[in-house]
Image (tube, helix red, strand yellow):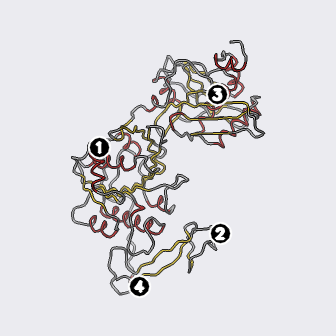
Amino acid sequence: MARKNTQYVCQSCGAVHPRWGGKCDACGEWNCVVEEATLTAPIGGKSSGRKASPGARARLELVALDGESRNLERRITGIAEFDRVVGGGMVPGSALLVGGDPGIGKSTLLLQVTAALAGGAKAIYISGEESIDQVRMRARRLGVAEMPVGLATATDLNEILGALNGPDIPDIVVIDSIQTMYADALDSAPGTVGQVRACAQELIRAAKRRGFTLVLVGHVTKEGTIAGPRVLEHMVDTVLYFEGERGHQFRILRAVKNRFGPTDEIGVFEMTGGGLAEVSNPSQLFLSDRDEPVSGAVVFAGMEGSRPMLVEIQALVAPSPLGTPRRAVVGWDSGRLSMVLAVLEARAGVHLSGNDVYLNVAGGLRISEPAADLAVAAALISSLTGRPVPAGSAVFGEIGLSGEVRPVAQAEARLKETGKLGFSRAITPRLRQTGGVARDLQVREIADLGELVLMFEDEEPTAHAAMARGVDS
């Protein structure tokens, strides 16, 4: 049996300590020192009992960049939204990490993906959280029970590696989840940092050597990051986050790291009684169906990866009874909102310092690009004045600290999506070229926030806002 030595490693800086302590002496972080074991033999292997002399070490073999290599064809699942996010299909020998909140639908999504691949490939689904009967019950609900998927429930790493190293090489292996796996060479409990890192390392090594696609399911912490060591995200080739609000039926699969495709790509799904259904045109889901324009509601023409998407941004500005007004944001960066409020007050003369400001991105979507600055500013001015944005308008543009409206990337794709969904107007920064703009789309280019404020002076206040402010509409 392999001899085992124990050491204590800081998960923040990597410093090694002879004993456990609540604080790392090297970096000063608290509760980051965990027990790890160093082995004289690899996990699942046998020790030869002999130590190699320094002169007998294996020599590293170097090869040329233009050498011959096998062609790695991507495995297409047929689920277009999933294939879009991973870059057009899964690469053989790659490792994917899928994280998300509990109950968001990670297991449902991966069971559907595994079943979709099982028609032309050998697929294995290993669950460490559910029994076989529970997984079969979900498969019947999803309508994939007849697909030839190899199903197993196991948490012992050596048992799993023994099955994966057999003569019959699988094409895709799903481990649900990595936090339930354990290596008996480590004394720590399953789910600890040492266990997660050791199990993931051995599974990824097997995938690279055998050439199958490995999919790991990871739990997330209360901060929204994947539980376990941060090095876990560096070890895998692709990191996907499955997001969504409990109150909405929409689910968003987002790529934050992808060695074989674009990052910041998203796929949109709808949770139904029969599982996750693809949403081919998500813009229609994130837009309201109201007939009359409403003050404080603006349609933003954004980009998620290579996909243009229209989403509604809602703002509410109300007088504050408090000395420090509230600033509540859902779906956008609160620091970015503070910047837009400061620029509106200092450069455009829009006084918002004595008002509560509430900002919401409809549909549970989260926006991170600065191109939403102009849409947010328009929503704030609209709510403050009670005058809606011109009917049928979509807005995009970045705001600078001097109050100028700066151009953004992929403006042509945003305008094409705006015209395709039936919008008649677009409020944009100065465009360099408009060759792909629809003929029936009226584009209004503005250079600074002063022009945006003047635009609202031409609009009549809504009836509700007129009664609230005592304005004769």
Instruction: Pinpoint residue 387: horizontal percent, then vertical percent.
Output: 66, 20
Instruction: Pinpoint residue 349: horizontal percent, then vertical percent.
Output: 77, 28
Q: Which mark is residue 141?
A: 1
| Label 4 with label 3: CB-CB less than 8 Å | no
Tell me the distance, in whole angstroms, between the alpha carbons under discs 4 and 1: 61 Å
Q: Which mark is residue 55?
A: 4
Q: Foreground mark, 4 or 2?
A: 2
Instruction: Pinpoint residue 84: horizontal percent, then vertical percent.
Output: 39, 42
| Label 4 with label 2: CB-CB less than 8 Å | no
Tell me the distance, in whole angstroms, between the alpha carbons under discs 1 and 3: 45 Å
Q: Earlier in the sequence, mark 4 or mark 2?
A: 2
Which type of secondary structure does the marked residue at label 4 adopt?
A: helix
Residue at (57, 20) in percent of width and height = 293
Instruction: Pinpoint residue 283: horizontal percent, then vertical percent.
Output: 46, 30
User: How many numbered marks have been drawn onto this rendered protein structure?
Assistant: 4
Q: Amino acid at mark 2?
A: Gly
Quadrant hosting residue 285: top left
Query: Looking at this view, is 289 or 66 the one in front?
Result: 289
Q: Which mark is residue 28?
A: 2
Tell me the distance, in whole angstroms, between the alpha carbons under discs 4 and 3: 71 Å
| Label 4 with label 1: CB-CB less than 8 Å | no
Q: Amino acid at mark 4?
A: Gly
| Label 3 with label 2: CB-CB less than 8 Å | no
Q: Earlier in the sequence, mark 2 or mark 1?
A: 2
Tell me the distance, in whole angstroms, between the alpha carbons under discs 2 and 1: 50 Å
Left or right of 256? Residue 77 is left
Q: Earlier in the sequence, mark 3 or mark 2?
A: 2
Q: Is residue 290 above or below residue 400?
A: above
Which type of secondary structure does the marked residue at label 3 adopt?
A: helix
Label 1: few (<14), some (14–19) or many (≥20) C-alpha neighbours in 10 Å: few
Query: Looking at this view, is 256 or 148 the one in front?
Result: 148
